[in-house]
Image (tube, helix red, strand yellow):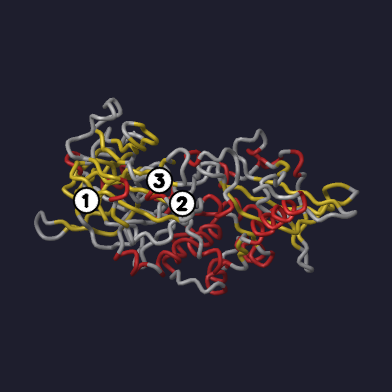
């Protein structure tokens, strides 16, 4: 049915209003803690937001003013046209308003951003998807008098979602002036500021954790505490539920932020300064071993630590304190350990000191360092449909996972003749999937442990195929028409 000009205009205005009204407002740090950083929201967004809050001016009247020219591409900034009408339309009148975006790390002048944003420490790197959008009320005298009346954090769609360079409205949030003020408080650098900030924001970080944050982050200790409060304390509050559900875990655990409550540096002869000096060089990683088991890789362990005796230890997740297996690394600064633990998402390798018992009996001592939790590769979009496909490891076996957007209500009828096959390599022809390792899309089982993940329903097929390098999942729309294929496992 064709709408009249007036009716079409009304519908367009309604859509614009609905889109803008859907943007959630973050009023304080507690609101910020509710976002799933490292899952649906890049953790790097927190670094960018911390920098922005510390860079702009906020006066006693709660007026935010620019401190840089947004048209100069300084800090990777440039004009944002809001052509997709994701945000409110610009007010009309004599006063000029304009949207700008900042944070593109590939812009020529993005290097003017501080090092902790451009070259963040392990666990916060991001993929240059996150941005800050702000709206400026411009004055005739130039940008120096410009007032900021709207601030948002947002992110580009994944390339697999085939949305071009558009921003994702479902993961766009307005940041209140009050939240910016709270974040600015974490820019203090005096000796007592960590304890003051902990008490002011009701953090449960104990004195040992504050000492570790101070030693690890140095001049950026307040930033470390801010990340601890927003990410780690949110994870701790959900610890009971997360232990019951090992399906989906935080994808950016970090040995600096995920600090066990009983963690203390009492390692004889090893100073906090030594650990800090080598924390960026040491590498701990969980990867795929023979037979679908977990393999621990380590490298660049300092000779001072090796001399005292250290071991690699495997845990179920960054929150667990009960080891699954461990092995002394002897005098090897780099090496690997093939465990007997089936590979699963969330596994984490840590470096501990060796605790010596009687005779030759040893056990796990105090923690020194940790790697990231093991991640399954990201899902790939099923071209032309609001769904995506992922290959996962489940108890050492290959698992195919479907993410179906809640808006894709007729997916079962659309995918009625669709199936997913598992292949030992990308060289295999479509019909040459592994023996009986396939399933109809509509017969995938719901995964109710992943609740409301990015407004998707999640379905899984658990195969009997051992996960190994080269394994691939493909989505066949009908007959042998491939609509999506995952990257080969381990590549």
404 vs 146, left or right, is left
| Viewer-nearest of discs 2 and 1 | 2
Image marks 2 and 3: residues in contact by CB distance under 8 Å: yes
Direction left: furthest residue: 359
Q: Residues within 10 Å of mark 2 (few under 14, many from 20)?
A: some
| x, y percent for residue 479 | 31, 33
Look at the picture and state if 469 lies above or below 5.
above
Which label sits on residue 304? none
Look at the picture and state if 345 lies above or below 107.
below
Residue bearing mark 1: 395
Q: Is residue 453 visible?
A: yes
| Viewer-nearest of discs 2 and 3 | 3
Q: Residues within 10 Å of mark 1 (few under 14, many from 20)?
A: some
Between residues 13 and 390, which one lies in front from this camera angle? 13
Q: Residue at x 32, y 57 (%)?
A: 446
Task: State which tag comes first along the sequence, 2 or 1.
Answer: 1
238 vs 124, left or right, is left
Which label sits on residue 414? 3
Q: For the residues marked 2 and 1, what is the alpha-carbon distance in whole angstroms?
A: 30 Å
Which label sits on residue 408? 2
Between residues 433 and 480, which one lies in front from this camera angle? 480
């Amino acid at each position: 049915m064709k709408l009249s000009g007036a009716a079409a205009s009304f519908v367009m205005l309604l859509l614009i209003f609905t889109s803008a009204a859907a943007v959630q407002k973050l009023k304080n740090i507690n609101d910020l803690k509710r976002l799933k950083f490292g899952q649906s929201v890049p953790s790097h967004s927190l670094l960018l937001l911390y920098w922005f809050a510390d860079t702009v001016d906020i006066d006693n009247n709660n007026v935010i003013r620019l401190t840089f020219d947004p048209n100069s591409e300084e800090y990777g900034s440039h004009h944002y046209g809001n052509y997709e009408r994701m945000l409110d339309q610009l007010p009309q009148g004599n006063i000029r308003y304009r949207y700008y975006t900042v944070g593109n790390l590939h812009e020529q002048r993005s290097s003017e951003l501080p090092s902790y944003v451009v070259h963040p420490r392990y666990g916060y790197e991001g993929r240059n998807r996150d941005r800050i959008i702000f709206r400026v009320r411009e004055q005739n005298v130039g940008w120096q008098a410009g007032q900021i009346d709207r601030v948002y954090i947002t992110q580009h769609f994944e390339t697999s979602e085939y949305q071009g360079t558009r921003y994702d409205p479902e993961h766009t949030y307005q940041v209140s002036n009050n939240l910016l003020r709270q974040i600015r408080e974490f820019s203090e650098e005096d000796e007592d500021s960590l304890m003051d900030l902990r008490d002011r924001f009701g953090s449960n970080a104990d004195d040992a954790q504050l000492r570790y944050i101070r030693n690890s982050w140095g001049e950026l200790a307040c930033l470390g505490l801010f990340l601890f409060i927003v990410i780690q304390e949110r994870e701790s509050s959900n610890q009971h539920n997360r232990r019951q559900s090992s399906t989906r875990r935080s994808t950016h655990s970090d040995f600096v932020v995920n600090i066990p409550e009983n963690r203390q540096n009492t390692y004889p002869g090893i100073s906090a300064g030594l650990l800090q000096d080598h924390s960026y060089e040491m590498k701990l990683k969980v990867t795929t071993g023979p037979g679908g088991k977990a393999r621990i890789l380590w490298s660049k362990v300092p000779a001072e630590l090796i001399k005292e005796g250290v071991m690699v230890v495997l845990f179920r997740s960054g929150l667990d304190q009960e080891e699954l297996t461990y092995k002394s690394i002897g005098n090897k600064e780099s090496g690997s350990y093939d465990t007997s633990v089936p590979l699963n998402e969330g596994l984490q390798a840590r470096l501990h000191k060796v605790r010596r018992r009687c005779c030759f009996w040893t056990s796990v001592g105090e923690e020194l360092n940790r790697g990231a939790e093991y991640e399954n590769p990201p899902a790939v979009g099923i071209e032309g449909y609001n769904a995506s496909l992922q290959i996962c490891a489940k108890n050492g076996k290959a698992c195919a996972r479907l993410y179906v957007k809640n808006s894709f209500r007729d997916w079962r009828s659309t995918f009625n003749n669709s199936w997913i096959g598992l292949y030992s390599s990308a060289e295999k022809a479509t019909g040459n999937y592994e023996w009986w390792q396939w399933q109809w899309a509509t017969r995938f089982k719901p995964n109710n442990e992943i609740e409301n993940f990015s407004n998707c329903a999640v379905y899984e097929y658990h195969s009997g195929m051992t996960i190994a390098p080269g394994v691939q999942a493909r989505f066949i729309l009908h007959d042998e028409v491939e609509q999506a294929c995952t990257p080969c496992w381990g590549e």
